[in-house]
Image (cartoon, rainbow, N blue to C red):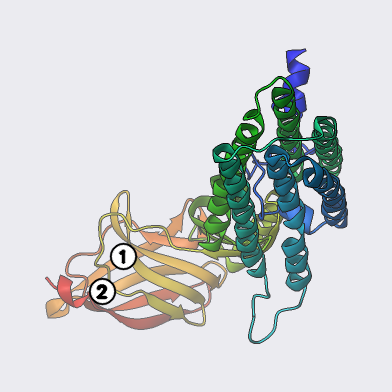
Amino acid sequence: MWKKILDWFGFGSHGHAAHAGGHDHHDHHGPNGHTHGVIDATIATTDRGIWAIKWSFVILAVTAALQMAVVAISGSVALLADTIHNVADATTAIPLWIAFVLVRRKPTRAFTYGLGRVEDLAGIVIVVIILFSAIVAGYEAISRLIHPMPVAHLGWLTAAGIIGFLGNEIVAVFRIRVGREISSAALIADGYHARTDGLTSLAVVVGAIGVWLGFPLADPIVGLLITIAIFAIVWQSARSVLTRMLDGVEPGIIDEIEHSAAHVQGVQKVAEAKARWLGHKLHVDIAIVVDPGILLAEANVIVAKIEEELFAHVPALAVATVRIVAPEATGHHHAPDPFRVNGRLAQGLLEIVDTPDGERFRLRVSRHAEGLAAAVAIHRSEGAIEQHALVPVNGNHHLLQSEAAPEEPHEFEAELVLSDTAESERLAFRMMEPEDHHH
């Protein structure tokens, strides 16, 4: 029995079953996922989701209209507060719908990212609407506490409370069912929120019973309690909307991004992951570290696989920018600028790097002749030549490294000696240390 009750309120095993697939997506809205004015992308980008928003609006609007008629004849501030709450819930669909229409416009030279931020403005409008409704409801409740007035037509008042409950329950069942169809955590959470709103309507019935039992202040007290509930929604909604306006995202999104990228073969480390919302579309920027010896074609394959993983596992993703960055230097930070190799036998980059065994020459080759051999010849003072043969690292012929460290100072004239089975070439270069690291 308790399990059924918990599931009815959304705390059971199906309360947040947002995704039917095998991958465990994070619920981006937390345990109490409803946030007025911030609609999950699975709602906004799905015709079925938008259809659910429209019909929820119609049902709540009809419910509020019926309640408003009873408010006029009964004078109940508890019912007034509940009606204002339902009107605000229904009204929030209007700025969202306008935002969805504008968001679908194509980017222009003036608005190169499109009009996604319009949804943030809609969120602010919604917060103001809910705040205004809370102030009005609170004023009426406090006024009635100070200046009590009789509440009439208790039978109609009770019926209106039940109507409010039924209207919210219909919306709850509708949203939960459609939410599970389109795998939308937010729409499911909206459904359970509507179910909770139905209980505030039943509170109106409790107030009517209190008045009937001879306690006339029961009606404004219930109205005040409903007002407090509306203010709680204002706080939750404002925090969520402002977070998005300031480019904030839910931590679960970053976790999902890092998880998706880190499990792609060839990625050594996720150096940085950023995300921001533009309306209901997510833009992601991720920096990864890969083996410095791999070819450009291999790196492109890794980037493509990461993008594929991100689009498969991150809901609402619109743009994914994947950058390859160099590993962080460890210890030695005054290496000279690298030498770009562009010869007949090889192309690549020669540099002095830090390794677990100390400083080494490293040659990363993007193109090379068959059977390439390489060495660095450093011209020291008095005609001395310092030789460093470059050998493949772990059999990787695109990553060659010296077995010993070049002597200090790292400021010298040198030659990169390249050869294959048929010919050889010598590429002269000069390495200079940064000005603040001269020896």
The residue that appears at 60% across and 32% down in the rendered structure is 221
Residue at x 36% of width, y 74% of height: 338
Snapshot quadrant of residue 110: bottom right
Q: Is 102 left or right of 258, judged from the image as shown?
A: right
User: Distance from label 2 to label 1 (Cα)?
Assistant: 8 Å
Residue nearer the viewer, 53 or 405: 53
Across and down, in percent, residue 278 comes to 63, 65
Q: Residues within 10 Å of mark 1 (few under 14, many from 20)?
A: many
Q: Quadrant of the N terminus?
A: top right
**50 relative position to 31: left or right:** right
Amino acid type shown at disc 2 = Ile
Q: Which mark is residue 91?
A: none
Which residue occupies the foreground of this view, 370 or 430?
Answer: 430
Disc 1 element: strand
Relative to 160, residue 95 above or below: below
Image coordinates of residue 422 in percent, x first then y, are 53, 76
Task: Judge whether residue 138 can be spotted in this image.
Answer: yes
| Whether label 2 touches label 1, CB < 8 Å | yes
Q: Quadrant of the C terminus?
A: bottom left
Disc 2 crowd, CA 10 A, few/some/many (<14, 14-19, 20+): many
Residue type for callout 1: His
Quarter residue 124 falls in:
bottom right
Q: Which residue is mark 1?
A: 388
Query: 246 and 91: which one is in front?
Result: 91
- The residue labelled by disc 2 is 378
Across and down, in percent, residue 310 comes to: 66, 54
Determine whether the residue tagged by mark 2 lies in a helix, strand or loop: strand
Q: Which residue appears at 51% of the width and 50% of the height? A: 268
Q: Is residue 10 visible?
A: no
